[in-house]
Image: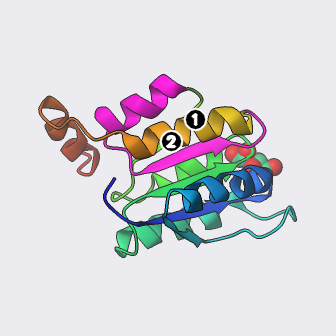
Amino acid sequence: MTDTTIAIACDHGGYDLKMQLIPMLEARGLAVLDLGTNSSKSVDYPEFGYAMASTIRDGKTDYGVLCCGSGIGISIAANRYPEVRAALIHDALGAKLCRQHNNANVICFGGRTTGPDVALDCLEIFLDTEFEGGRHERRVEKLSNPT
Ligand code: RB5
């Protein structure tokens, strides 16, 4: 990825994992735009998925990381914006393919389903892998233009 800023957001179920991912992003020299939530107090995940999506739509960054309990709700929320391709990831191959084939711009994790070591490994791969383009370009274009 070329952007030097990355956004990150979570709900209460993803808060602990988010706090474990931020130091790695900073260690890579990225400016981290933390969109909350800022504690384990119960909140509604759609608000944080939408905060991420509007940040990307408005051009404040090209990439983001989202965490909720399962990773499911917050990824559904973010994917309601056509500018977002949010991928819920559980393993290294998924982290690679979501960049190579889908040009995913947001990686999502479940704080209750994925441990910090796996999430950190997947996040490194996500950040280091480029979109392959070619035949995937046309398919990714179609994602932003549902019929
Ligand atoms: C919150 O309890 C939980 O529902 C949320 O973090 C997430 O897993 C939703 O998909």
On whether residue 110 falls in the magenta region, the answer is: yes
Q: How is colour applied across the structure in the image?
A: rainbow
Spot occupied by residue 31 in the image (x, y as percentages of width and height): 50, 70
Disc 1 secondary structure class: helix
Spot occupied by residue 82 in the image (x, y as percentages of width and height): 34, 57
Crowd rating for badge 1 (residues with CA inside 10 Å; few <14, some 14–19, many 20+):
few
Q: Is residue 72 visible?
A: no
Mark 2 — residue?
A: 124
Q: Residue at x 63, y 38 (%)?
A: 119
The segment highlighted magenta reads 92-113
Q: Are marks 1 and 2 in contact (CB under 8 Å)?
A: yes
Q: Quadrant of the C terminus?
A: top left
Spot occupied by residue 81 in the image (x, y as percentages of width and height): 40, 60
Residue type, mark 2 in image: Glu
Mark 1 — residue?
A: 121
Q: Is residue 47 visible?
A: yes
Q: Residue at x 74, y 33 (%)?
A: 113
Disc 2 secondary structure class: helix
On whether residue 111 falls in the magenta region, the answer is: yes
- Indicate left or right for 19 with 105 as reference: right
CA gap, disc 1 and disc 2 = 5 Å
| Residue 41 higher or lower than 93, as above or below | below
Crowd rating for badge 2 (residues with CA inside 10 Å; few <14, some 14–19, many 20+):
some
- Indicate left or right for 136 with 63 as reference: left
